[in-house]
Image (cartoon, rainbow, N blue to C red):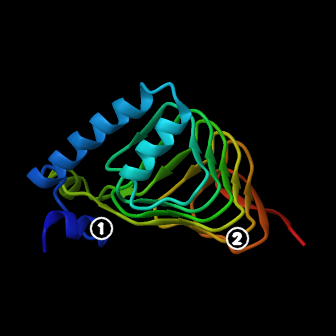
Amino acid sequence: MTERDKMLAGKPYKPGDEELKNMRLRARQLMKDFNNEDDASKRSSLLKDWFGSTGENLHMEQPFRCDYGNNIYVGENFYANFNQTFLDVCEIRIGDNVMIGPNCQLLTPLHPLDPIERNSGVEYGAPITIGDNVWLAGGVTVLPGVTLGNNVVVGAGSVVTKSFPDNVVLAGNPAKVIKTID
């Protein structure tokens, strides 16, 4: 099993692996291209070529940061506002008709709690899944291993530390259900 395979499986892996370093370097170049492109249709085209998969009607404002990019899967009718950070050591899967406000973070990496293990340089991660018809308001952070169901709204500044079902409004740090959507 390669370090990349371990990473995607959520197992401890070594991020200093040559293949992973080269993939991150490629992602940095693609981020530079994306973040310096003025034409929105060209930016969307760059993302379609770069991400694991995308639907139609893809629009993301600049700037955008990620680890790899090819572990990000986006559905139809996706909009993300300014200053997104999607750390994709594991898959990030985003459904159809999703809107993401400015300054949001989708973070799949985890680091060992044990200081000896952490200092050894190993990391691991857990995927993030976001359902259809979801709106993340500005400044939302979604942590590793979270699944958000369909028709979820997450209030501004929330930190989502666990998974939630369909048809709920979340807010807070940590995020909790504040309303059910009928």
Q: Which mark is residue 58?
A: none
Quarter-of-image position of residue 51: bottom left
Q: Give how far across and how far down residue 55 sits, in percent.
A: 55, 60
| Disc 2/disc 1 C-alpha distance (Å) | 24 Å
- Give the camera-side residue of 181 and 117: 181
Mark 2 and 1 residues: CB-CB less than 8 Å, in contact?
Answer: no
- Give the camera-side residue of 11 and 28: 28
Residue visible at 64% across and 64% down in the picture: 96
Mark 2 nearby-residue class (10 Å; few <14, some 14–19, many ≥20): many
Point out the image quarter for the N terminus. bottom left
Of callouts 2 and 1, the N-terminal one:
1
- Give the camera-side residue of 129 and 78: 78
Please state which amino acid type lies under the numbered disc 1: Leu
Could you tell me which secondary element the residue under label 1 belongs to? helix
- Give the camera-side residue of 166 and 120: 166
Residue visible at 49% across and 31% down in the picture: 63
Q: Is residue 77 left or right of residue 51?
A: right
Q: Which mark is residue 8?
A: 1
Q: Which residue is mark 2?
A: 150
Quarter-of-image position of residue 162: bottom right
Could you tell me which secondary element the residue under label 2 belongs to? loop
Point out the image quarter for the C terminus. bottom right
Mark 1 nearby-residue class (10 Å; few <14, some 14–19, many ≥20): many
Query: Please, is residue 125 above or below residue 78 in the view?
Result: below
